[in-house]
Image (cartoon, helix red, strand yellow):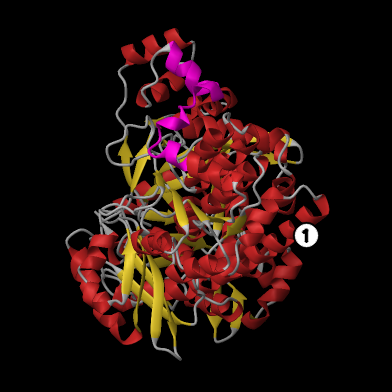
């Protein structure tokens, strides 16, 4: 198993600097190292980082065109003009729309909110939609979380009696719209102190300017927008997130409380992961599958019954979204792993009638699995049109790559890591070829996305005290990443696949800590048998039956696979033999017996029939002697897997001298005894049949008995000889010695001895 990421250890502060910061800020050296990496080295910066203060927000009037925006909106309210808020269908767009709606309503306006359709309007200003809004008498259009790229539709609106105020935070195009006002934190030529506001953050600044004070009740929405839109959680966004999450925990708005309830989230535990994995996916599902307007209804309602109904419908929509993603992902992954795509530097994967709204999610998951830029397309077989989304890796600028194939597409747009596009289905092969040409220089089979590792730690650093101290650095996100640590554990055990189809892993680390590895179920056997393991993880907790314990949330694994993979188990089961290996036997009878009752995941053969350098071999049973084992180890290619199964008969002890005597006495009392009836001897002497057979072999070799045909007769007065001098006795003792040793030797001892046989 190859690691999924390129681990990059962040710069570590020297011990003296760490000690100085720890003393100055009254934190542990463990936390001081992390603060040094984040540039937090003095008391004032640390205090501001820990404790949110809304008084530290910047003056909204510093934003470009804010005076113009406030004047025009105020005029529209005073003149009772028809105002429409033009939002977007993602969480940032829904929260932006809600903030603006509530602010306008608080000063007497009755604005209409228009959430465009992903499927008919697309993202951002749409001329057809603008024309419909103008036709119903809209006099002022306020865009939130969009608009800065809408030069032509906005020009039409302005020329046709519909004024436009743009509030946005997206990348600035070369030519900006000629609107009444363009409020943007990075507008050229302005110096607003913080340029990474989300759309909801910009809307909150406009609301603050309109009202003359911060609408504190809307800070929770700015937090949702910032976290969900993955903007930098620093400066103002950190304040929004800290205060907004406190609001979610203590007194969530009616709709969000209902949404958390259907998601199974206790509001008291709400954090940035609650937003990222419970709230945001559900709200985003609305726009992915249909009309996102219910998102604004949910965020603005005060009616608990309505909130519950909306939240339930939204949760149902999200379940449909999850199923669509799962279905399309399964098909897309199979295509991505097909032989034709194994060495491809980029993937273009298409299917008929895949739901367009979830293709971006599927593309992200395929990128995560393969490390390759990926475009996922859905084909409409009736029109021959293909539409889709692409996601990329840091080493490849997707938008520039698509520019290389611009002549194959009808439309495309995006940025370095994501894009949307449409084209004729018969041009998909052309797009694939050109995108792969563009990616070949930047993406190889060894290309992996980077994983920033905050620090190397050992088990002594994994404490509840350190976990609690880490919480002071939260909320984590873009610009303030959750720390990722690396650890080389001494022991990894209790490896178990969990979840649907065993997709995930749970295991123990160094006997003290539980670990969870999502999506890594396939490496269970490799992890359990690895000679050395290195883990990249975040610290978290797990609560089970009221008890909370530390948990390692695994981000990636590096495995140094042992050359001898120890699969020894007390009892063979069907599951033991399910892997796709070549199963080799020393004893034909053992092979016949096991293959008759177990299904093997790969072919079975005799060890003596293995070709030289045979790969992927499991040595199933025990050899009869050291020579057989030596020959096997010199035949197989490493790594070799060993079960060393022995049947109960193979482990029966050599009879004692007294037991040998009882068999000989029986044979003297029964002259010309039929050897086919040795089971009767076993019953009378209370021995195992295999022990009786061994005794007869030893007696024959020492001339204590004669065998003529099927008849055994005791010799009347044999010459005295030691039992141990018989070859059968010595061979049996040697067999038992090797069986016992192979089954009980430690993993390290077994590895050392087996590899020594190859020399």
Residue 488 among magenta residues: no
Asked whether 694 or 290 is in front, the reply is 290
Classify residue 657 by image quadrant: bottom right
* Residue 654 visible from this viewpoint: no
Q: Main secondary structure of the magenta part?
A: helix
Classify residue 442 by image quadrant: bottom left
* Residue 173 visible from this viewpoint: yes
* Residue 530 shown left or right of residue 82 in the figure: left
Mark 1 sits on what residue? Answer: 309
- Magenta residue span: 43-69
Residue 751 x/y as whole percent:
38, 49
Residue 196 x/y as whole percent:
40, 39
Asked whether 595 or 135 is in front, the reply is 135
SS for dot 1: helix
Image quarter where the N terminus lies is bottom left
Residue 61 among magenta residues: yes
- For label 1, the crowd category at 10 Å Cα-Cα, with few meaning under 14, some 14 to 19 and many 20 or more, is some
In the rendered image of this protein, does residue 515 appear above or below residue 640? above
Which residue is farthest bottom? 382
Residue ID at (46%, 21%): 31
């Amino acid at each position: 198993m190859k690691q999924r990421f390129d681990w990059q250890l962040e710069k570590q502060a020297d011990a003296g600097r760490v000690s100085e910061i720890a003393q100055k800020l009254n934190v542990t050296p463990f936390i001081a190292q992390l603060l040094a990496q984040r540039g937090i080295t003095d008391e004032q910066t640390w205090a501001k980082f820990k404790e949110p203060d809304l008084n530290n927000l910047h003056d909204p009037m510093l934003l470009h065109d804010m005076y113009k925006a406030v004047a025009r909106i105020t005029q529209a309210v005073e003149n009772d003009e028809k105002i429409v808020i033009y939002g977007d269908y993602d969480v940032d767009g829904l929260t932006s729309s809600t903030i603006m709606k509530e602010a306008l309503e608080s000063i007497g306006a009755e604005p209409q909110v228009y959430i465009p359709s992903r499927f008919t309007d697309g993202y951002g200003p749409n001329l057809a939609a603008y024309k419909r809004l103008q036709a119903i008498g809209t006099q002022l259009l306020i865009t939130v979380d969009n608009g800065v790229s809408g030069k032509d539709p906005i020009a039409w609106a302005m020329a046709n009696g519909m004024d436009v105020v743009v509030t946005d935070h997206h990348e600035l195009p070369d030519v900006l719209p000629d609107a009444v006002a363009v409020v943007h934190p990075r507008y050229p030529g302005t110096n607003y102190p913080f340029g990474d506001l989300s759309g909801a953050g910009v809307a909150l600044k406009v609301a603050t300017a309109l009202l003359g004070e911060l609408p504190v009740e809307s800070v929770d929405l700015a937090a949702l927008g910032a976290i969900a839109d993955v903007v930098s959680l620093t400066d103002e966004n950190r304040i929004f997130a800290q205060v907004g999450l406190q609001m979610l925990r203590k007194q969530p708005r009616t709709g969000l409380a209902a949404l958390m309830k259907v998601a199974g989230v206790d509001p008291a535990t709400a954090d940035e992961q609650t937003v990222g994995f419970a709230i945001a996916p559900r709200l985003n599902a609305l726009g992915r599958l249909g009309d996102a307007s219910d998102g604004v209804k949910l965020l603005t309602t005060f009616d608990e019954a309505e909130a519950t109904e909306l939240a339930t419908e939204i949760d149902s929509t999200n379940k449909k979204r999850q199923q669509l993603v799962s279905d399309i992902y399964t098909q897309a992954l199979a295509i991505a792993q097909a032989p034709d795509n194994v060495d491809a530097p980029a993937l273009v994967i298409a299917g008929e009638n895949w739901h367009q709204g979830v293709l971006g999610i599927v593309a992200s998951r395929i990128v995560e699995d393969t490390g390759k830029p990926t475009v996922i397309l859905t084909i409409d077989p009736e029109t021959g049109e293909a539409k889709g989304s692409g996601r990329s890796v840091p080493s490849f600028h997707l938008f520039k790559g698509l520019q290389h194939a611009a002549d194959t597409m009808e439309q495309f747009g995006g940025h370095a890591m994501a894009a949307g596009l449409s084209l004729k289905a018969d041009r998909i092969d052309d797009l694939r070829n050109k995108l792969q040409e563009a990616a070949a220089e930047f993406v190889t089979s060894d290309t992996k996305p980077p994983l920033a590792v905050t620090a190397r730690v050992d088990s002594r650093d994994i404490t509840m005290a350190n976990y609690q101290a880490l919480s002071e650095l939260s909320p984590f996100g873009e610009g303030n990443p959750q720390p990722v640590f690396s650890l080389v554990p001494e022991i990894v055990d209790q490896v178990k696949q969990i979840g649907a189809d065993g997709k995930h892993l749970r295991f123990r680390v160094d006997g003290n800590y539980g670990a969870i590895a999502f999506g890594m179920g396939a490496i269970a056997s490799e992890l359990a048998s690895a000679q050395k393991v290195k883990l990249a993880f975040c610290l978290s907790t797990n609560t089970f039956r009221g008890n909370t314990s530390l948990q390692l949330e695994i981000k990636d694994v590096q495995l140094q696979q042992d050359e001898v993979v120890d699969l020894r188990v007390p009892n063979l089961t069907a599951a033991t033999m399910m892997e796709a290996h070549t199963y080799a036997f020393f004893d034909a009878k053992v092979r016949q017996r096991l293959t008759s009752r177990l299904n093997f995941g790969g072919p079975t053969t005799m060890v003596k029939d293995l070709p030289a350098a045979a790969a992927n071999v499991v040595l199933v049973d025990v050899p009869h002697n050291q020579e057989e084992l030596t020959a096997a180890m010199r035949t197989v290619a490493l790594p070799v897997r060993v079960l060393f199964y022995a049947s109960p008969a193979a482990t029966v002890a050599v009879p004692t001298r007294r037991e040998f005597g009882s068999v000989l006495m029986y044979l003297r009392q029964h002259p010309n005894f039929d050897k086919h009836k040795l089971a009767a001897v076993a019953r009378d002497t209370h021995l195992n049949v295999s022990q009786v057979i061994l005794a007869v072999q030893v007696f024959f070799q020492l001339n204590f008995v004669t065998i003529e045909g099927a008849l055994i007769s005791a010799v009347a007065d044999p010459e005295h000889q030691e039992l141990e001098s018989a070859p059968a006795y010595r061979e049996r003792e040697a067999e038992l010695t090797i069986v016992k040793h192979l089954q009980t030797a430690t993993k390290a001892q077994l590895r050392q001895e087996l590899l020594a046989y190859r020399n």
